[in-house]
Image: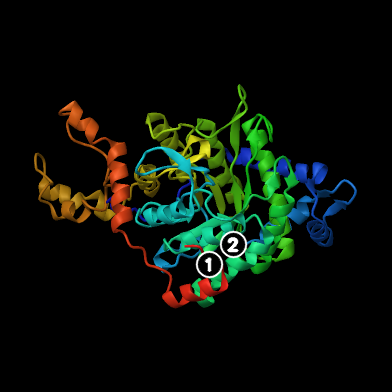
Amino acid sequence: MAREIKKGFSGGQYKPLSAYDVGRIHETAFRILEEIGVRVELKEALDIFERGGAKVDRGEKIVKVSSELAEEMVDSAPSKIVLGGREKENDLVLEDTRVHMGTGGAALNVIDMDSGKKRKGTLRDIADIAKLTDALDNIHFFVRPCIAQDIPIDDLIVNQFYAALSNTTKHVMSGCTKVEKVEEVVEMAELIAGGELRDRPPLSFITSWMDSPLCFATDVTKVLIEVVKEGLPVILSSAPMTGLTSPITLAGTLTQLHAEELSGIVLTQLINPGAPVVYGGIPSMVDMHNLKFIAGGVEFGMMNAAISQLSQSIKLPNYNSAGITDASIPDIQAVYEKAYSICQCALSGSNLIHHAAGMLESLLTVDYGLYVIDNEIIGMAMRSVRGIEVNEDTLALDETKEVGPGGNYLRSKHTRRHMRSEFFEPMLSNREERGDKDKQELSGIRRLAKSKAKKILKTHHPIGIDPEVDKRIRERLNILM
């Protein structure tokens, strides 16, 4: 297995926006909030905005927020958030340009490990993919990858969280579409975390609360309000699509998204000042020929990298997407689309990059073997983020003197000391000569990745939830696994 590349290295080397560009977007987003506003149907949210000093038109259900109020609320939100793992070594510290990569999605389909055919996702898939990624060192957090379509809808949310939490010690994130289910998920989290739920929460909530352009989705806004009241981390996920739910220009889409994010941040801080909130943008494109969602284009990575700059400009942790492909199978197209956006977002200093592993077919499908391939891509990207360390030891002047002209560094202690830490060691890449073509095809990357995925699922045993805690969870909640 590939040697671990540690998480949390600082990015920020890639900046698709200049400082001037960021300022223009920020100023224009303020104008959107002040002059156009956002539509909010939920009375509770309207009341919160009005009490907080926003201008509320009850008839039109439009909320307008002054730049002064927006800036005050942004300053209220924490610039550093800790997302806990069940094991402390898997904690994520979100601040500045520290980079972390994870899974993502709400895919409908899974490529079956045995038949190779596409089928509907199940609760077992969520558990197995959590187990798989628990063993993949370069994947730092886990987002539910698919929708379990084999259990009753009423049991879906709590069981998806449980399937993930019980099969990985990494931080778990997922959505919650029903406000009445928040209490159940929080109860489970409290049992798992003990007295550390607020300091090291083992789970966080993704809320796709914004129906672009500029409309709060009522049901998810209810969830957002409840999570914020609980004081748990919440990701504000806004996903405008160029030319359809946002302007066709990249700058226009980013400006609208920034205004949407600011409006959500204002709401969270009016509810609970200091509540941990993550600026979550997933801007994407639409194919103007057929109006299909596109995520494999180069502009997708550019916009999601720009999200890092916008959130960093207001000193808030961020969440975005990379590693999505429009390819339907793990082919060359899939790999180059994934690798490019992963590198763009990693080098921009994104704090939480989700969708970075396993996704196919514009988020419709996940593939077990692809998690292994993407783990490799992520490891290479994180090595790039880590950069080249320059100090007295790495400059190696003494070693160069000792070896001298025409010498050889192979036997040097300096070489032995650095040979394992200086280079990323892939577990899939074939660095041998071409050899026999037929044999090479039999040992292709896809076949090898699938084989490794199967081996991990057979041999890896994640640290489970404490048996007594698990018993209490099952006594209180309808757990189906």
Instruction: Look at the picture and state if 17 lies above or below 473.
Output: above
Whole-percent x, y for residue 477 in the image: 56, 69
Instruction: Look at the picture and state if 306 lies above or below 228.
Output: above
Image position of 82 (left or right of 314): left
Mark 1 in CB contact with mark 2 (< 8 angstroms): yes
Q: Earlier in the sequence, mark 1 or mark 2?
A: 1
Classify mark 2: residues with Cα within 10 Å, few (<14), some (14-19) or many (20+): many
Q: Nearer the viewer, residue 127 or 27?
A: 127
Which residue type does callout 2 highlight? Pro
Which residue type does callout 1 highlight? Pro
Which quarter of the picture shows residue 234?
A: bottom right
Image position of 475 (left or right of 6): right
Residue drawn at x 50%, y 31% is: 298
Which label was assigned to residue 201? 1
Q: Which residue is mark 2?
A: 233
Q: Report helix, strand or loop for mark 1.
A: loop
Residue drawn at x 65%, y 54% is: 177
Residue drawn at x 56%, y 51% is: 318
Whole-percent x, y for residue 92 in the image: 47, 60
Q: Nearer the viewer, residue 224 or 159?
A: 159
